[in-house]
Image (spheres, rainbow, N blue to C red):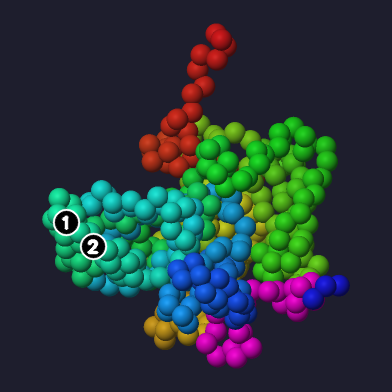
């Protein structure tokens, strides 16, 4: 076993950022300064940051010309879907949100007709205030352009100081960018997060091969190499196309890490998108409700109105579990595995709020709270067991609805043409 493999077995190369961890020291290597061509030093740190998984932080300094440069590179895998963040910046407090932008993300401020294209700026983690500040550093000596640039810089300064409202969008086909929601677990009304399917051109830019035909999966278990989402050690993922009785085809994916013991499974719909969306509302009245079988597709949102809680699509991926298992997964993601709950990233107010949320989830599991759990799936590929079948369930309501234009856009249906192919 190599030294790297031994390190992975001991818990992984990537550790959470912790100011109190004295063992977490960067690796220092000698590097050539591209400013004065003398030798400087680069510090590399392999770590994790909130909601961004594994990253590599590199910081270069030159003692000869004092030139410095800091970069962040994603060390995690490319996500299954791209992500578009749209933030309506209305107050000075919005400028304090943490922002993570990967190399392949593009940033826009429509009010200024201003854009930073993808792959023109290295990946970085900063506060939104810093991102505006970074644009205000250059001047030109050309008199013809100086006046326009001065006006542009003054406008940026006003945005930085919160004197004007504006919109910030970050479009990341790799899915590895992030804008902080300071109100978790409640919904952020100023922030819209949209997950989308990448185009073939975006997959080509990211170096992703086209997916295999589903027909090849029907009679075999496919095994492919991946990395453990917990310790980043090499692992195998098994994938199988399965027909669920009285429902439809689903793809079951399971990953088991031999290094840290982490296990994960995910279910994806193998069938077509239904003509109508499905909204399932369950009134939890008894602890036995927790044993109901549940299939949540990757396009399904989970809502608990009594807690003012909404879990967007793709947040937990597809799952075939029980209602209790879904609630425990939500609690683990929001409370137990939340990096903002430990180290110097946490605040007393945030910790108290999330701890209270976890206690309410425990009460729901014990049926000690009168709540409604809603599964809203625009694709119509989610399911909750009716324990009274074949009779109607008095505590469960299933509604079929027509999708909105925005929901069809999220599912990639608006640009899909299915008429006229037989004539060609």
Query: Is residue 107 something one can see in this rendering?
Result: yes
Q: Is residue 347 above or below residue 119?
A: below
Q: Is residue 304 above or below residue 171?
A: below
The image quadrant of residue 240 is top right
Q: In which quadrant of the rendered image does the N terminus lie?
A: bottom right
Residue 151, given in percent of the width and then of the height, sits at 15, 58
- Number of the label disc, if any, that sits on residue 139: 2
Query: Is residue 300 something one can see in this rendering?
Result: no
The image quadrant of residue 153 is bottom left
- Residue 376 part of the magenta-drawn span: no
| In front of the other: 244 or 61 | 61
- Residue 5 part of the magenta-drawn span: yes
Residue 66, given in percent of the width and then of the height, sits at 42, 79
Under tag 1, what secondary structure? helix
For label 1, the residue is: 146
Q: Residue at coordinates 49% horizontally, 67% vertically from top-left?
A: 34
Which residue reaches farthest top? 423
- Number of the label disc, if any, that sits on residue 243: none
Q: Is residue 44 above or below residue 114?
A: below
Magenta range is 4-25
Under tag 2, what secondary structure? loop
Residue 187, given in percent of the width and then of the height, sits at 38, 63
Q: Residue at coordinates 28% horizontally, 67% vertically from top-left?
A: 137
Q: Main secondary structure of the magenta part?
A: loop
Q: Residue at coordinates 48% horizontally, 62% vertically from top-left?
A: 123
Say if mark 1 contacts mark 2, CB within 8 Å. Answer: yes
* Drawn side of residue 205 relative to residue 243, left or right: left
Nearer-N-terminus badge (1/2) = 2
């Amino acid at each position: 076993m190599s030294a790297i493999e031994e390190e992975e077995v001991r818990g992984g190369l990537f550790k959470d950022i912790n100011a109190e961890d004295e063992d977490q020291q960067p690796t220092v290597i000698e590097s050539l300064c591209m400013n004065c061509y003398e030798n400087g030093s680069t510090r590399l740190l392999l770590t994790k940051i909130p909601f961004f998984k594994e990253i590599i932080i590199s910081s270069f300094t030159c003692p000869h010309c004092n030139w410095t440069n800091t970069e962040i590179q994603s060390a995690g895998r490319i996500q299954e879907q791209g992500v578009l963040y749209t933030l309506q910046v209305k107050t000075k407090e919005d400028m304090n949100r943490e922002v993570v932008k990967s190399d392949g993300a593009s940033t826009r401020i429509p009010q200024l007709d201003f854009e930073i294209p993808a792959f023109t700026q290295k990946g970085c983690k900063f506060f939104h205030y810093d991102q505006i500040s970074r644009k205000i550093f250059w001047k030109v000596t050309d008199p013809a352009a100086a006046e326009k640039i001065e006006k542009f810089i003054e406008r940026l300064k006003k945005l930085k100081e919160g004197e004007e409202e504006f919109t910030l969008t970050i479009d990341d086909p790799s899915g590895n960018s992030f804008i902080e929601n300071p109100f978790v677990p409640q919904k952020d009304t100023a922030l819209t997060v949209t997950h989308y399917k990448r185009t073939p051109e975006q997959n080509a830019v990211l170096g992703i091969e086209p997916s295999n035909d589903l027909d090849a999966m029907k009679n075999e278990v496919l095994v492919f190499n991946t990395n453990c989402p917990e310790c980043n050690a090499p692992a195998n993922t098994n994938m199988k196309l399965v027909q669920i009785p009285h429902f439809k085809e689903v793809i079951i994916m399971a990953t088991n890490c031999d290094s840290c013991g982490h296990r994960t499974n995910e279910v994806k719909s193998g069938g077509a998108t239904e003509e109508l969306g499905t909204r399932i509302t369950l009134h939890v009245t008894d602890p036995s409700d927790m044993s109901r079988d549940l299939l949540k597709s990757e396009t399904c949102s989970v809502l608990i109105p009594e807690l003012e809680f909404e879990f967007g699509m793709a947040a937990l991926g597809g799952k075939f579990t029980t209602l209790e298992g879904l609630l425990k997964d939500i609690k683990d993601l929001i409370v137990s595995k939340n990096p903002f709950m430990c180290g110097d990233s946490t605040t007393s107010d945030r910790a108290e709020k999330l701890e209270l949320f976890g206690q309410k989830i425990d009460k729901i599991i014990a049926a000690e709270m009168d709540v409604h759990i809603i599964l809203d799936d625009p694709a119509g590929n989610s399911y909750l067991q009716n324990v009274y079948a074949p009779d109607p369930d008095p505590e469960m309501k299933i509604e079929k609805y027509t999708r909105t234009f925005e929901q069809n856009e999220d599912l990639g249906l608006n640009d899909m043409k299915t008429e006229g192919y037989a004539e060609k």
